[in-house]
Amino acid sequence: MILSVSSSVITICKDAAGVAGNIFAFGLFVSPIATFRRILRNQSTEQFSGLPYIYALLNCLLCMWYGAPIISSDNVLVLTVNSVGAVFQLIYITLFIAYAEKVKKIRMFGLLLAVFGLCAIIVAGSLQIIDAAIRRMFVGFLSGASLISMFASPLFIINLVIRTKSVEFMPFYLSLSTFLMSSCFFIYGLLNYDPFVSVPNGIGTILGIVQLVLYFHYNNRSREDSNEPFIVSYG
């Protein structure tokens, strides 16, 4: 009886963490909207790069496949969050291709086909693995490695913030969304006894904390160094 209640509580907590992770991930998915408003307004991609959206799509598709019931039957919330993420990235990539110069357009379209081709090979290859545990491990390692490299990408921004002592290029809400989403899925992975979810998101949680600490440290320093009067506005 006690074990049954304990198991139910763990399941509820796990699902709650997964749902919260899905909600916080939405903050990450909508973060490029400001960039694409500018692209639509100027009818040009200017100096923006489309590579982050290509890589984000690849990551979402790999993690989505890992969350599919045929690979891991207990990761539905991993499937949902990455399905939504893949849709957002496809929209961004489509808009980028539509307004990019000819050379960028061809390059982006080629990379998009490469992503679909690579994912098709991974899907087809994993389906050839008869043993379900080995199949899950194979896809899990690929999705985990992709997720770790995605979470490691802000290291460049962290280095830039430390060198310039400015948080100009590290948006607060993006860092906060990254921290909240990764910490929720870290808990989800722990409660689900799934290292392919908990380990990458644990790394993401640590990097999210580092970003937030740097933000508050250098943001406060820039305010202290400023000679401008501090004005509080109400309403």
Image (cartoon, rainbow, N blue to C red):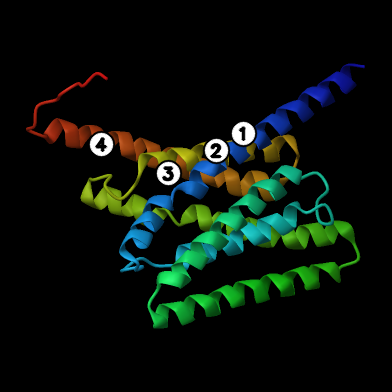
Secondary element at tag 3: helix
Find residue 46 and report its horizontal and vertical position in percent. Answer: 31, 68
Mark 2, Cα crowd under 10 Å, few <14 / some 14-19 / many 20+, is: many
Q: Quadrant of residue 99?
A: bottom left
What residue type is disc 2 on?
Phe
Q: Residue at x 61, y 33 (%)?
A: 20
Q: Quadrant of residue 221?
A: top left
> Residue 219's mark?
4
Q: For marks 3 and 4, give the one nearer the viewer.
A: 3
What is the quadrant of the N terminus in the image?
Answer: top right
Q: Is residue 203 visible?
A: yes
What residue type is disc 3 on?
Leu
What is the quadrant of the C terminus in the image?
Answer: top left
> Badge 2 is on which residue?
24
**CA distance separating discs 2 and 1:** 6 Å
> Badge 1 is on which residue?
20
Q: Observer-nearest residue: 15 or 165?
A: 15
**CA distance separating discs 3 and 1:** 16 Å
> Badge 3 is on which residue?
174
Q: Residue at x 69, y 41 (%)?
A: 189
Question: Cβ–Cβ below 8 Å for labels 2 and 1?
Answer: yes
Secondary element at tag 4: helix
**CA distance separating discs 2 and 4:** 23 Å
Mark 4, Cα crowd under 10 Å, few <14 / some 14-19 / many 20+, is: some
Question: Cβ–Cβ below 8 Å for labels 3 and 4?
Answer: no
Q: Residue at x 69, y 55 (%)?
A: 64
**CA distance separating discs 3 and 4:** 15 Å
Find residue 231 and report its horizontal and vertical position in percent. Answer: 15, 24
Mark 1, Cα crowd under 10 Å, few <14 / some 14-19 / many 20+, is: some
Please state if 150 lies on the left or on the right of 124 as rendered.
left
Question: Cβ–Cβ below 8 Å for labels 2 and 4?
Answer: no
Q: Earlier in the sequence, mark 2 or mark 3?
A: 2
